[in-house]
Amino acid sequence: MLTLPKIAAIVSGSFLIAIAINFFLMPLKVLDGGLIGISLILNYLFKIKVGLVMLLLSIPIFVFIWRHNHKTIYTSVIGLLLSSYLIDLLEPYHYYFLYYIEWTPITRSILGGALIGLGLGIMLRFDCSTGGLDLLAHYISRFIPMNIGVMIFIMDGIIVSAGALLLPEDTFILSLLTIAAGGVTTGLCTLNMPDAAH
């Protein structure tokens, strides 16, 4: 059921993710993990819209989850649609943030990862998500006694490691900082979630 707290979680989480991707990661061509990371790789290589790729890649995961748990799907579809839309909506503005706000690449990478982790964590806290691998991790956590943030961190590490083949060495290191910050923040947000182990 779509309650007011869930709507607030979806909106705030989606905004945080869109801001992190466009204003912190994309100007430096830094990766995150999961489907966001795959979408960023395709954007950097082929200029394909990040939100659109996220949407398309999430379809198989939604089909899998739908067969096992209908309840989470509805809010996750809304989260995916909103976050994908906001990511592509804000994309033209990311260079302004790069040129007018002087932060070091390390600071940008850590803050970007932390904002993504916070956005995902808020949504997961209210049994919502943006779809993708965080939805899959949320589902798996019901059967495996592992914190969702740790699980997402492992998946993210695999994606960024694969992307390292396409990235300069310094960008790879910045991407590792991003997923570490995101994993920590998501983990803190999802600590002691009542439904995580059920």
Image (cartoon, rainbow, N blue to C red):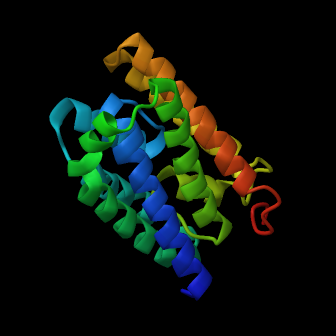
- Which residue occupies the foreground of this view, 185 or 154? 185
Residue found at x 71% / y 56%: 189
Left of 116 or right of it: where is 140? right
Residue at the image point whose x is 64% and y is 72% from the top: 126
Tally the marks: 0
**Location of residue 58 (image quadrant):** bottom left
Observer-nearest of 59 and 15: 15
Residue 98 point in image, percent of width and height? 32, 36
x, y (%) of residue 21?
Answer: 39, 45
Q: Is residue 197 shown above or below 127?
A: above
Q: Quadrant of residue 139?
A: bottom right
Residue displayed at 29% across by 64% down: 85
Q: Quadrant of the C terminus?
A: bottom right
Q: Where is residue 119 in the image (x, y as percent from the top left)?
A: 55, 57
Horizontal and vertical percent for residue 122? Answer: 62, 63
Q: Which residue lies furthest to the top in this view?
A: 169
| Frontmost residue, 33 versus 30 | 30
Q: Is residue 196 left or right of residue 99?
A: right
Q: In which quarter of the image is residue 124?
A: bottom right
The answer to whether residue 113 of the structure is visible from this angle is yes
Relative to 41, does residue 185 appear above or below in the rendering? below
Name the residue located 16 percent from the left edge and 35 percent from the top edge: 46
Q: In the rendered image, which quarter contains the N terminus?
A: bottom right
Q: In this view, does 140 lie above or below 102?
A: below
Asked whether residue 66 is in view, the answer is: no
